[in-house]
Amino acid sequence: MNKSPKKYTVAVCLSAIFGVLGVHHFYLERWAHGSIDLTLSLMALYFFSQQQYIWAGLFFLMDLVHTVYVTSLLIIGKYKDGNGLFVKAPNH
């Protein structure tokens, strides 16, 4: 397996802290996934501002589930960057 030149620690931290905004996807050059995450977050904020809490919660929940899934894949080294290379810990 080829290893990505992207930093494992940076990717995991970005995913854990800013995951619902898709920042980690942009860092890993996965532009479509980043755009989807950002759109889900913005939709949740929009519906929240319109006091439509059910819709806001649904969009946020979808984004959160996706973020937890991707973060777990990053942690175990099974997630690929935009070039198809695995993002792995430095000692692997």
Image (spheres, rainbow, N blue to C red):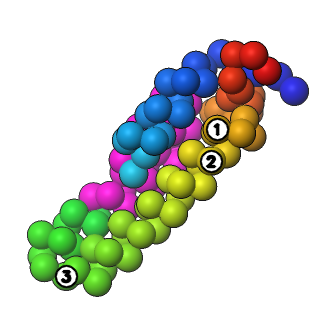
Is residue 26 at least partly visible in the picture? Answer: no
| Position in image of residue 51 (x %, y %) | 13, 79
* Residue tagged 2: 72
In this view of the protein, which residue sits in the foreground, 91 or 79?
Answer: 91
Q: Does residue 5 show up magenta in the picture?
A: no
| Position in image of residue 60 (x %, y %) | 36, 66
Boundaries of the magenta span:
21-42
Disc 1 versus disc 3: nearer the observer: 1
Is residue 84 at least partly visible in the picture? Answer: yes
In the orientation shown, which residue stands out farthest toward the front?
Answer: 91
Q: Amino acid at mark 1?
A: Ile
Q: Amino acid at mark 3?
A: Gln
Q: Residues within 10 Å of mark 2 (few under 14, many from 20)?
A: some
Which comes sooner in the sequence, label 2 or label 3?
3
**Residue at 45% across, 42% down:** 16
Q: Does residue 31 show up magenta in the picture?
A: yes
> Please, what secondary structure does the residue beneath circle 2 have?
helix
Where is residue 9, by image quadrant? Answer: top right
State whether residue 5 is above or below residue 26.
above
| Position in image of residue 72 (x %, y %) | 62, 47
* Residue tagged 3: 52
In the orientation shown, which residue stands out farthest toward the right?
Answer: 1
* Residue tagged 1: 75
Marks 1 and 3, Cα distance to the nearest angstrom? 35 Å
Q: Main secondary structure of the magenta part?
A: helix
Find out whether the residues at labels 2 and 1 contact each other: C-beta distance under 8 Å. Answer: yes
| Position in image of residue 83 (x %, y %) | 69, 29
State whether residue 40 is above or below residue 35.
below
Disc 2 versus disc 3: nearer the observer: 2
Which comes sooner in the sequence, label 1 or label 3?
3
